[in-house]
Amino acid sequence: MIAAQTSMLEAASIYLPLEARILDVRPLTQLEKLYTIALPEGMSLNHRPGQFVEVSLFGIGEAPISICSSPSQSGNTFQLCVRRVGELTSALHRLEPGDSIGIRGPFGNGFPIERFRGKDMLFAPGGLGLAPARSLINQVLDERGFFGRVIILYGARHPSELLFTEELSKWEKRDDVELHVTVDRPDDNWKGNVGVITTLFQKIQVDAPNTIAVTVGPPVMYRFVLVELLGLGKGIREGNIWLSLERRMKCGVGKCGHCQMNHIYTCLDGPCFSYAQIRHVEEALS
Amino acid sequence: MKNSMVISKTSMKAWIEHLGKDFRLIGPKPFQDRYVFGEFHDAAEIDLNYPAAMLPLKKILLPQREDLIAFGKTNGKAEPVLENRPTIVLGAHTCDLHAIASLDHAFLEGYIDQHYRSRREHTLWISLECLEPCSEHAFCKDMGTLVTPDKFDLHLTDLGDDYVIDIGSERGAALLHGFDAVREAGEDDYRQFDQVMSQKWSCFPYRLEVDFTDIPRLLATNYRSVLWDELGERCLGCGACTLVCPTCFCFNVIDEVDFSLHEGKRYRTWDSCQLNEFALVAGGHDFRPSRAERLRHRFFHKYKNQVATSGLAACVGCGRCAEACIANITPMEVLNSLHRRRVASARHKQEASPQ
């Protein structure tokens, strides 16, 4: 964060992107591709898990995308998982290794991983929410000794929409990771759990006072997952439940106004919040 | 107010000519039956005795369209566009100067917006003391913006035949150097100034029934008021209120490629939280889908949330939004309605409770 601000302050404009280069493109599903990107001159992005960058193509536009690689595995590159939903992301999907793209950031606060150390980690990402969660999951796994149990509950709509399937099977094989995956609608080959993500919570017991829960997904998912995590469910304290909120963070630097929730700029004060921080913010979860 | 200067109105033309040699001049110009801030070269083009200009001075610091980056599609060119023409704004009303403080907070706190800063640093303000209300909708007296903030470089007060000039900065003082037709103010000038100033206050009405320092609390207890739904039914969601607002700063960023298809500009343009889809995200969720929610967001931002983050309300009481609203929704109506309902509900509770 500090490194990022220093470099932003040196820039002639906070809106001027760096010209970065795509090193690798890998399709993950019909809609999502994984990009490995390098900043110019071997610069490191120096991000925290949970932060995002503004990705742009001149002539088309700019959009916030969360960084899905962990700082521990980044070195001088980082990864973005891009879902094709609009004009910019469709153009991004046409790019190939060697092509350049504009990058500003990293922005936002990221997860306070240093406060999570010594705790059991319960991850509950849904759909594309696995992308930002992955930056934290891999950081935790690379510092495995600092954490207690690692539980991952992941839900997608359909088997074909599961992201990072290679990594999922790696996590599946580890005896220090408890992974449960579910899909809303199975196909003929699916042998795993069927149902929305909340159905996975009955499969696990947690030591609530010692557990940090991290959930990333759309607003409607938060409403149901929170019920499972809070007093009537697992009984995890509000301050130990962490979410990453999606907003239209057009500028990323707290100027354009699109991501305001009451007095909070999601792009500056978030996108990562504990439930305790936002439960009284009227617009946060509606 | 000591060390003030005096310029006679008959010398204004020459002074403006003098200033125009080194600066782009912006002032209130008659336009159809209204006034707009625009570039001028001759004193005859402007009228300092003007009612509120249609658009506020944010259009100088944050133009409706402002190029941010000039880019090349193929040659890797990407250069920031910074406006640095030396500019003087002549005749800013005190509320519009207060609005600059609000914009400064938005663009110069946290990450510094270099595009705004460049315009800000190259602009000098010759403001004008308001001696009578300039709009039937203005409630500057309620908002505490009837007194000039310390943002001006020079500040003029109309004494009839002369203007008294209060000097706010060294750059402002320099605008008087080498111009012989100004003189130091004498005892008579100060006496006349005090008289004009003390007479002005009674000309301005209070319009709010609630004290402006109490508005954040009034809103805090009224997030779920039915008033927002009632107003949402009337509101057309057109965004005119935010466009004419001197403190509204939200913007969108758009890329435009020129006819060569090789070069283009990334520019920002005023956006409005009142417009549909302002808070829509790529995933398809709209965080403020109804007009009632968007209108409430505007009021909460202006009178509560920005007060919490900057200490300043994002409203200077200029009344432009009230003037612009086709549905006749005004801050006075909204805030006074909330206040009246609060009073009525308190009275109701008092009567209902056993002695």
Image (cartoon, coloured by chain):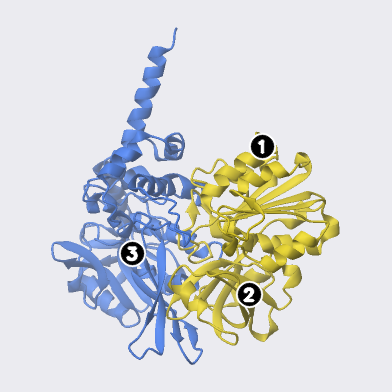
Q: Nearer the viewer, mark 1 or mark 2?
A: 1
* Camera-side residue of A236 and A172: A172
Question: Measured from the top left, where is residue A100 in percent x and y?
Answer: 56, 84
Residue type (three-letter) at the residue carrying disc 1:
Gly
Question: Measured from the top left, where is residue B38 in percent x and y?
Answer: 26, 71
Q: Nearer the viewer, mark 2 or mark 3?
A: 2
Question: Measured from the top left, where is residue B320 in percent x and y?
Answer: 27, 53
Q: Which residue is label 2 attached to?
A: A7
Dot 1: few (<14), some (14–19), or many (≥20) neighbours within 10 Å?
A: some
Residue A279, placed above or below residue B6 = above
Checking the image for residue B132, the label placed there is none
Q: Given the image, what chain letter belongs to the residue carrying mark 2?
A: A
Q: Which chain is yellow?
A: A
Q: Which residue is label 1 attached to?
A: A233
Q: Which residue is label 3 attached to?
A: B57
Spatial distance from mark 3 to mark 1, Cα to Cα? 54 Å
Colour of chain B in the image = blue
Spatial distance from mark 2 to mark 3, Cα to Cα? 32 Å
Instruction: Describe residue A176's horizontal placement relative to residue B108 as left or right.
Output: right
Label located before the other in sequence (1 or 2): 2
Residue B210, placed above or below residue A144 = above
Q: Quadrant of residue B340?
A: top left
Where disc 1 sits, the SS reads: loop
Name the quarter where the N terminus of chain A is drawn. Answer: bottom right
Spatial distance from mark 1 to mark 2, Cα to Cα? 44 Å
